[in-house]
Amino acid sequence: MTGSPTDKKAAASQTTGRLRPPGGERGRAWVDARAGIGTLLLLILVTAPMVAVSAGRNLSFDSGTHRVMVVELYTSEGCSSCPPADAYLNSFAARPDLWTDFVPLAFHVDYWDYLGWRDRFAAPANDARQRRYVALGRMSAVYTPAFVVNGRGWRPARRDAAPVPDQAAAPRLRVQLAGPRVEARLSHGAAGPRPLEFHLAVLGMGLHSHIRAGENRGRDATHDFVVLAHTQHAGGGHRWSTALPAVPAVAARRYALAAWVSRPGDPTPLQATGGYIPASLVEKKR
């Protein structure tokens, strides 16, 4: 049930992507050009299907009408083959299409804890999510490191190779935050009127561990996009109202929100959105 070191090694082998203006007429032309650029940037910000920040602590996230790709990594600090895959997922933080085309998620699993190092980011629910993919035939086995893209097992052809963005039309997912309260709505579109589940995750960025035992003994690990808390919510009418889940008291450099919808019984994300959120919105468990 827990996957084997042999499976892990085999998978790893395949995983190894203020300027001063001039005077006179030139000065006026320079100012006009700057104003034009400012207008263009404003139009881009208004039309981009990304994150809009409004007054106070209100935030909104919008997937747009193309399918955003959810890149899931199943990993463990107790797996010697996982650091390259962790670094690969971390690299998404520098991509210009982060959140607009890709939502990365690092699900830490606990089935390697017996090797001597307890992964503090692992949760049994993450193990169960991976096993569900196997049960549905979306993955061949339970192992780490393992990537799943939009619900199917995937391996990068190169360490710098990302999945090809999916430009297919998809229902639009909008998420609004008013403080810790979350309101979400999905346009029916191709999803039809069938019941769907809404998933909400708080992600930790810039998390550091000094691993003192197990296969990675002596290593310093840095993790981004770690799923620190994940909740799912049933609901009719493709509308959901909930709150940000509390997270463990870990020292994250910053936090992000990821939201997606799926069909009951199938973890495959149908649409997703996300973005960075201020630490003041994140409740820590006591």
Image: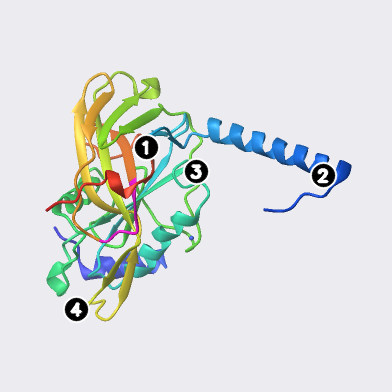
Label 1–label 2 contact, CB within 8 A:
no
The tag earlier along the polypeptide, 1 or 2, is 2
> Whole-percent x and y of residue 183?
29, 28
Q: Amino acid at mark 4?
A: Ala
Could you tell me if the residues under marks 1 and 3 are in contact, i.e. CB atoms within 8 Å? Answer: no
Q: Which residue is mark 4?
A: 213
Q: Which residues are magenta?
A: 251-256
Q: Earlier in the sequence, mark 1 or mark 4?
A: 4
**Disc 4: CA contacts within 10 A as few (<14), some (14-19) or many (>=20):** some
- Can residue 138 be spotted in the picture? no
How far is the residue under mark 1 from the one under mark 2? 46 Å
Label 2: few (<14), some (14–19) or many (≥20) C-alpha neighbours in 10 Å: few
At 35% across and 58% down in the image, what residue appears? 224
The picture places residue 231, in percent across and down from the top left corner, at 20, 40
Q: How far apart are the alpha carbons under marks 1 and 4?
A: 36 Å
Judging by the rendered image, the residue that carries numbered circle 1 is 272
Q: State which tag comes first along the sequence, 3 or 2.
A: 2
Q: CA distance from mark 1 to mark 3?
A: 13 Å
Q: Which residue is mark 3?
A: 165
Residue type (three-letter) at the residue carrying disc 1: Ala
